[in-house]
Image (spheres, helix red, strand yellow):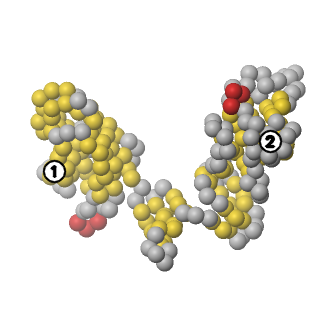
Amino acid sequence: MASLSKAFTAVGNADGFSVNDKDSISYAITGTFVATVVLERTRDLQTWEPVLTKSTTATGTYTAEHPGGASSLYRWRCSAYTSGTVTCTQVDVASVIKTFLDASGAVIVSITEAGQDVTGALTVSGAGTFGGNVGITGTITSSGDAIIGGDVRVTGVVAANVTSIEKDSTGDILRCKCATANIPTGAGYAKGCILIATDGTDHTNTLFANIGNATTANFNAVTIAADV
């Protein structure tokens, strides 16, 4: 489900939402108020039972447990109101489907409803085909072809306010972007590295190339042919 939110300024009920057995929802109770809100569920669409009661601001996660494994309908209800506005917000938390542990018990792979998280380096011995976005914060070593159908984002900022887009095999940046005021002069940018100026205004100040080296960058503007 998408994020749902209800602001109460009086006693009343929010719309119901369905939650599957073992699914988790992240909730937040916010605002300045004197009131009590209750998270309730129903199994027969007639009787509601409370599962959480809050009279102050709070955040947390609630994991549903339903006899028989069926889904149930939930809702927020303001059961008592004196003053202010109390806002109840909740959103699905991706449930963990499977985890893999190392010898010490630390999680190294976690498969959830949202996808797969790998802690540490990922070694791919064959071809890797990715149909969606790939966000890489660690190292991926591939001895075969990597065919990417979506965006590839390789994190690793060498200088403040400079975003790395692509690195070479030695770790030097091949492509990056930043505002012109932040164009770097330090180490970590391969010779010929392309820098995109995020505040460039025309064909003379949007693209820069490193004519220096990986020790000392020297980005010069590359003149692009003007529109015909």
- Residue occupied by mark 1: 50
Tell me the residue at 25%/68% (across/down): 68
In the drawing, does residue 197 fall left or right of residue 218?
Answer: left
Residue 89 picture quarter: top left
Q: Position of residue 218 (x, y in %)?
A: 82, 36
Q: Is residue 218 above or below residue 44?
A: above
Q: Secondary structure at mark 2?
A: loop
The circle on residue 195 is none
Q: Is residue 124 above or below residue 64?
A: below
- Residue occupied by mark 2: 216
Q: Three-letter amino acid code at disc 1?
A: Pro
Q: CA distance from mark 2 to mark 1?
A: 64 Å
Mark 1: few/some/many CA within 10 Å (<14, 14-19, 20+): some
Front position in the image: 215 or 86: 215
Q: Position of residue 32 (x, y in %)?
A: 23, 30
Quadrant of the image containing the C terminus: top right
In the drawing, does residue 38 fall left or right of residue 115?
Answer: left
Residue 36 in view here: yes
Tell me the residue at 79%/25% (across/down): 205
> Are the residues at dot 2 and dot 1 in contact (C-beta closer than 8 Å)?
no
Mark 2: few/some/many CA within 10 Å (<14, 14-19, 20+): some
Q: Earlier in the sequence, mark 2 or mark 1?
A: 1
Q: Three-letter amino acid code at disc 2?
A: Thr
Q: Is residue 28 above or below residue 171?
A: above
Tell me the residue at 51%/67% (across/down): 109
Q: How many marks?
A: 2
Q: Secondary structure at mark 1?
A: strand
Q: Position of residue 115 (x, y in %)?
A: 51, 58
In the drawing, does residue 45 fall left or right of residue 91?
Answer: left
Tell me the residue at 49%/64% (across/down): 111
Front position in the image: 175 or 160: 160
**Disc number lying in front (2 or 1):** 2
